[in-house]
Each structure stands twice: as C-alpha cells, then as structure tokens.
Image: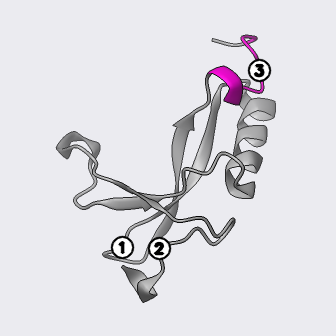
Amino acid sequence: MVNGSTTCPHCRQPLAKWEPCAESGWDCDLYYCENNECPYFVKGRQIICETYEKNFAYRYCLNPGTGQETPIVAWCGGDLSLLKGRCS
C-alpha cells in the first residue's frame, strides 16, 4: 500500500479492496471508497445527475502499485439515485 495509507483522503474512511476481472484492463487489485456519504462520491453523483441525467457517480480509487489516484464509475440506483426514475 502506498505510504501505508488505506483510507480515503476525502472522508477518511477505510478503502475497500476490489479485485478487477481480467477483462477490465486493470492488472492489479485496486482500493476504492465505498462510503456513500463521502464528499467525493456525493459531488460526483450530483455532477453526473445534473450534467448527463444519469444514475451514476464516481468514487475515489487508488492503485497501490503505482500510487495513482483515479475516479471509478459507480451505479446509483435505488435510494442513491438523485433522479428517482426520471432517466434510463
């Protein structure tokens, strides 16, 4: 893990491990924030909803091998949807 850190820099919650499938293009395990109250996730959800009218957001993600931080797309159905069924 980079600098021994396994917490989200936006909300300080522990990061969850994600083991991407071979078809994803990622060649290692990644760590992401799964906190639905994280300011990074909340802002991403609002931006995508307002700009594209889609039920998606993005979450903070860390590649521990390279230290690269990147957003990953997340589906926001059900209670996480800001559109409440207004889009497909």
For image coordinates 36% across by 79% down, the residue present is 1
Task: Name the dominant secondary structure of the magenta segment.
Answer: loop
Q: Secondary structure at mark 1?
A: loop
Q: Does the magenta-highlighted stretch encompass residue 79?
A: yes
How far, Cα to Cα, is label 2 from label 1?
9 Å
Q: Quadrant of the C terminus?
A: top right
Residue span colored magenta: 78-86
User: Where residue 53 sits: x, y (%)?
Assistant: 74, 24
User: What's the coloring here?
Assistant: one colour
How far, Cα to Cα, is label 3 from label 1?
34 Å
Instruction: Tell me which amino acid carries mark 3.
Output: Leu
Name the quadrant containing residue 29: bottom left
Q: Secondary structure at mark 2?
A: loop
Q: Label 1: which residue? A: 64
For image coordinates 54% across by 56% down, the residue present is 33
Between 3 and 51, the residue placed more toward the observer is 3
Asked if residue 31 is positioned above or below residue 7 in the image, the reply reads above
For image coordinates 30% across by 75% down, the residue present is 65
Instruction: Tell me which amino acid carries mark 1.
Output: Pro
Q: Label 2: which residue? A: 6
Which of labels 2 and 3 is toward the front?
2
User: Where residue 67 sits: x, y (%)?
Assistant: 42, 77
Within-10-Å neighbours for mark 2: few <14, some 14–19, many 20+? some
Q: Label 3: which residue? A: 83
Within-10-Å neighbours for mark 3: few <14, some 14–19, many 20+? some
How far, Cα to Cα, is label 2 from label 3?
32 Å
For image coordinates 62% across by 30% down, the residue present is 76
Instruction: Tell me which amino acid carries mark 2.
Output: Thr
